């Protein structure tokens, strides 16, 4: 996968997160979880873009670590939405699967960059 393809993929993930957050119920729980999810989900794409312009290998690895953390946190909140029955699981499962795939990609990328 090229850098641009991964930029596009992380952006699509973030946009899909936005749609899930907009579908959450307008309750205290829905707003709280939505706020957490939108921050972590959008951060995946934003921090990956930032990683692509890093000035050093160490900075690149550190930034990818942030991307990984944000992807993992997004997966947590998506699992929380499913298990808390805030939305129908079918609506969230494919996004969760994408988050897990992105997490695996970034784990592999960090390992490769560390060489």
Image (tube, rainbow, N blue to C red):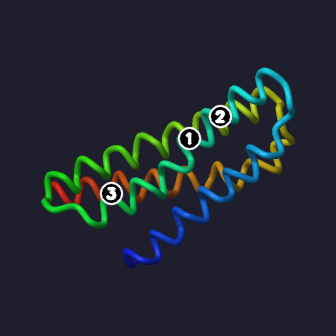
Residue at mark 2 to residue at mark 3: CA–CA distance: 29 Å
Task: Identify the residue under disc 1.
Answer: 39
Q: Which one is in front, 47 or 70?
A: 47
Closer to the camera: disc 2 or disc 3? 2
Side of 107 relative to 62 (left or right): right
Q: Earlier in the sequence, mark 1 or mark 3?
A: 1
Task: Identify the residue under disc 2.
Answer: 35
Q: x, y (%) of residue 89?
A: 81, 43
Q: Which one is in front, 78 or 101?
A: 78
Q: Which one is in front, 75 or 38?
A: 38
Task: Identify the residue under disc 3.
Answer: 108
Residue at 86% in and 33% down: 25
Q: Which one is in front, 34 or 105?
A: 34
Marks 1/2 in contact by CB < 8 Å: the verdict is: yes
Closer to the camera: disc 1 or disc 3? 1
Q: Which mark is residue 15?
A: none
């Amino acid at each position: 996968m090229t850098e641009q393809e991964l930029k596009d993929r992380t952006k699509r993930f973030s946009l899909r997160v936005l749609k899930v957050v907009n579908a959450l119920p307008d309750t205290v729980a829905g707003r709280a979880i939505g706020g957490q999810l939108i921050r972590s989900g959008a951060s995946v794409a934003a921090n990956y873009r930032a990683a692509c312009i890093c000035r050093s290998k160490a900075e690149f690895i550190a930034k990818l670590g942030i991307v990984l953390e944000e992807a993992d946190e997004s997966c947590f909140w998506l699992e929380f939405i499913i298990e808390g029955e805030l939305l129908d699981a079918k609506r969230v499962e494919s996004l969760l699967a994408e988050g897990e795939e992105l997490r695996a990609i970034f784990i592999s990328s960090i390992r490769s960059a560390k060489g």
